[in-house]
Amino acid sequence: MNTTTRRRLGRGLATLGLMTAAVLGASAGCSSASDDCAQTNSCGGGGDGGGGDGGSGAGTPAGCIPKGSDEAVKDDCGIWVSLSRGDDANDGSSKAAPKKSLRHAALVAAERGVPRVYACGEVFEEQVEVRPGVTIFGGLDCAGGWVWKEDTKTGVHGPPDVPAVKLLAGDGTTRLEDLEIRASDAETPGASSIGVLAAGVTAELERCAIVAGNGADGAPGAPGDPMPRAQGGTAGNPGRNACTMAGDGATTPGGAQVVNMCEEDGGEPSIGGKGGDGTFMVGRDGEPGEVGTLGQAGLGEPNGAGTWSCATGTGLGYAGEPGVDGDAGTGGTGNGSLSAESGYIGISGNAGTAGKRGQGGGGGGGAKGPGSCPGGATQGSGASGGSGGSGGCGGKPGQGGGAGGSSIALVSIEATLSLNGCALEAGNGGKGGLGGDLQLGGIGGTSGPGGTGVNLSRAGCRGGDGGDGGRGGPGGGGAGGHTLSIAFKGTPVSTSGEIRRLQGSAGPGGLGGDGNGANNAGESGSKADAQEFP
């Protein structure tokens, strides 16, 4: 048990002791001598599923029940355990040779068919699993002859991240008397602190105190990528100069198309359109960028006189359309679920979706050739257009934040439980984890320039820039942890005598990624005496 947990338990010990003493003193139910429970509506009979009369050691021979007797019960009543006097090498069959571990003693009692354990009023720092049909009698004053003392409790202080006591499923009635059960603060991100976990078992708990520590905060969601931006687009290729190719019918090829493969967009490409070719008679149109609705190609220079130029609407290639931003992940919402293994599973935030790739820019239009070229050629091909840049890739999404761990004193899953004169205290629920930040989309590739004209022929036109990739969506925040005295699935927990319940603070939901700009925080946890789960 870590120092923080010890400090917290120490601070709460005085309060818990007073609370437990009040409960135990009124374990037969509310009366005119104490109307506190009536004022707080915490008396038995109307608790979490109906009251009942608590009887010590139900199913145990009368001579083997320590409560109310001035003498210790006989050795052959069960298995004996003492932290200070015991040794797990002992067989535990007598007060003179007790076991040291309560966990081990409970196991041996079940295996030997003597399903009763008698425990000294000491603190056992271990997780204890109790098989069905086993009874543990705590509160024995071992220094005073192993007799039952009303003001003595046997402590079970469990390690972090696991329920302190697990009541295992099966036939037979499990019974715990005079135990103070404490779960440590959870340490692993998102882990819960649970005092007692009972699944598929019939069990009776009498004169008990069950304390859960604090749930751990949820883990933050991973960012979309360590790099702030996704892969950028490829720059377009330049067109070639006029007269590169001489002779009637010669063609100057336009800048070749460029391709950017985007992994996050299903491996699909963004393509910058090829530049228009230059010939002697005309300049040819460029090719449009892919894939999208914009990124139109520039027009080539027509034959004859005209007003063609490398301006928008004529020879200049159009820029590609930017990619669509990814959707934000939703925050974690809902109560979560109960688990027979860990006790509780919270709701994490959801990851965003990836941004889409930007469209490639259109290729620039080509120009027609000059009447003569350097070197004596009487005809020559015109300058060609540059290709469009390819679009940037879409940004990766942020991952969802983890759920905060819950603090639950008692978890009942398809079990039949009854409590008589017990105190149940929950700590604070853990904060939901922050959603992961998004990755920005890649910058679109710049377009390629057109080739240069010769002897008064016009230059080829520049292509269009590639569109930027869309941003990834930010991750949603994780749900906050609950603070609950009782959580149950199936039959509500039956109560009798005075039952006291205390809770700490519910954990707030984690904010969504990128400062919760998408308003996708997780839901805060709940605070309740008892909460039902589906």
Image (tube, helix red, strand yellow):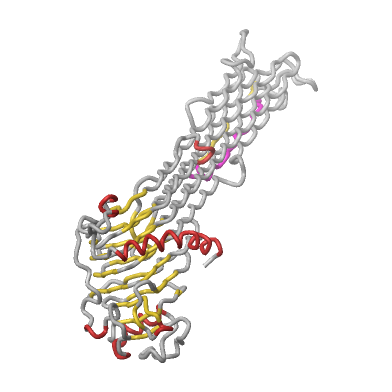
- Going by the image, does 509 lie left or right of 368? left
In which quarter of the view is residue 127 placed?
bottom left
Q: Residue at x 35, y 52 (%)?
A: 336
Identify which residue, 148 or 517, lies in the foreground. 148
- Going by the image, does 407 lie left or right of 72? right
- Going by the image, does 392 lie left or right of 31? right
Q: Which residue lies furthest to the front in this view?
A: 33
Q: What range of the chain is rendered magenta?
A: 250-267
In which quarter of the view is residue 13 placed?
bottom left
Across the whole image, how many numbered discs are drawn on residues?
Answer: 0
In which quarter of the view is residue 49 placed?
bottom left
Whether residue 396 appears in magenta in the rendering, the answer is no
Identify which residue, 212 or 162, lies in the foreground. 212
Query: Vertical placement of 261 versus 336: above or below?
Result: above
The answer to whether any part of residue 6 appears in the image is: yes
Query: Vertical placement of 203 versus 217: above or below?
Result: below
Q: Which residue is drawn at 61% across and 16% down?
A: 301
Whether residue 257 appears in magenta in the rendering, the answer is yes
- Going by the image, does 477 lie left or right of 526? right
The x and y percentages for residue 106 are: 35, 80
The answer to whether any part of residue 534 appears in the image is: no
Identify which residue, 513 or 454, lies in the foreground. 513
The x and y percentages for residue 231 are: 60, 41
Q: Residue furthest right?
A: 375
Query: Vertical placement of 98 versus 506: above or below?
Result: below
The x and y percentages for residue 174 are: 27, 74
Identify which residue, 496 or 532, lies in the foreground. 496
Q: Residue at x 42, y 85 (%)?
A: 99
Query: Vertical placement of 505 versus 171: above or below?
Result: above
The x and y percentages for residue 214 are: 46, 57
Q: Which residue is drawn at 47% across and 73% down?
A: 125
